[in-house]
Amino acid sequence: MEQPNLETSRLCLRPFTLTDASAVQRLAGSYEVADTALNIPHPYKDGMAEEWIGSHASQFAAGTLVIYAISLKGQDGIVGAVSLQVVKRHNRAELAYWMGRAYWGRGFTTEAAKALVQYGFEILKLHKINASHFKRNPASGRVMQKLGMTHEGSLRDHFRKGDTYEDVEVYGLLADG
């Protein structure tokens, strides 16, 4: 199955291509974005974006990852990314996202995440979608709340980002509400 594009009122979600690599490196690699995400390195070195993008198709084919570049409708460039890391055994996925700093505060992340959550429940037939954010990044938690996710708990010193242990807030959403 080929990964379909998804559209919202303002956005186009499409698979990444290697031509997006320089934008990924620039946007995701900015300190402000990388600092709020567990798996985005800083500095974002040359070649890392190409390697990351190159892994997407095989993971989609295996049914373990659905990841989209977020573009503004009518524009070629990307502004961020949204993904579902699928755990088939448990029929659930973890929602993750990042947005370029210049695009924060405009509702793009919520709009893109809402489209992917819908895809996860309607097309992938998932039972649950969960997400988490660093406690020090409440804006990410507001996205989860706008999606209708329920706060399921707090995990102290759960992840290590650089030399710092991070408290994490966990959210979840079930297919049947």
Image: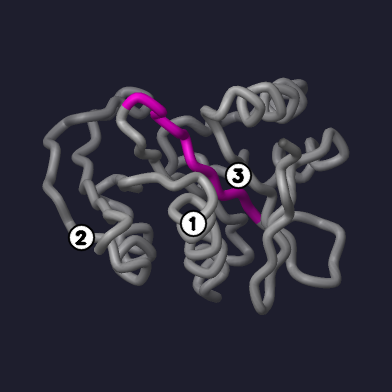
Q: Does the magenta stretch include residue 119?
A: no
What SS does tag 2 mark?
strand
Which kind of residue does numbered mark 1 sit on? Glu
- Decide which of tag 2 and tag 1 comes sooner along the chain: 1
Q: Position of residue 79 (x, y in %)?
A: 68, 58
Q: Position of residue 126 (x, y in %)?
A: 40, 45
Which residue is drawn at the image coordinates 27% and 28% (left, top)?
159
Answer yes or no: is residue 136 visible: yes
According to the image, label 3 marks what residue?
30
Q: Is residue 86 magenta?
A: yes
Which kind of residue does numbered mark 2 sit on? Thr
Q: Which of 86 and 112 is in front in this view?
A: 86
Nearer to us: label 2 or label 1:
1
12 left or right of 105? right
Q: Where is residue 155 in the image (x, y as percent from the top left)?
A: 14, 38
Magenta segment main secondary structure: strand
Q: Residue 48 carries which label?
A: none
Q: Residues within 10 Å of mark 2 (few under 14, many from 20)?
A: some
Q: Which scheme is used to colour this image of the protein?
A: one colour
Relative to 48, residue 134 above or below: below
According to the image, label 1 marks what residue?
122
10 left or right of 40? right
Q: What residue span does the magenta drawing correspond to?
A: 80-89
164 left or right of 29? left
Which residue is drawn at the image coordinates 61% and 41% (left, top)?
67
According to the image, label 2 marks what residue?
150
Nearer to us: label 1 or label 3:
1
Placement of the N terminus among the 4 image quadrants:
top right
Which kind of residue does numbered mark 3 sit on? Ser
8 left or right of 177? right
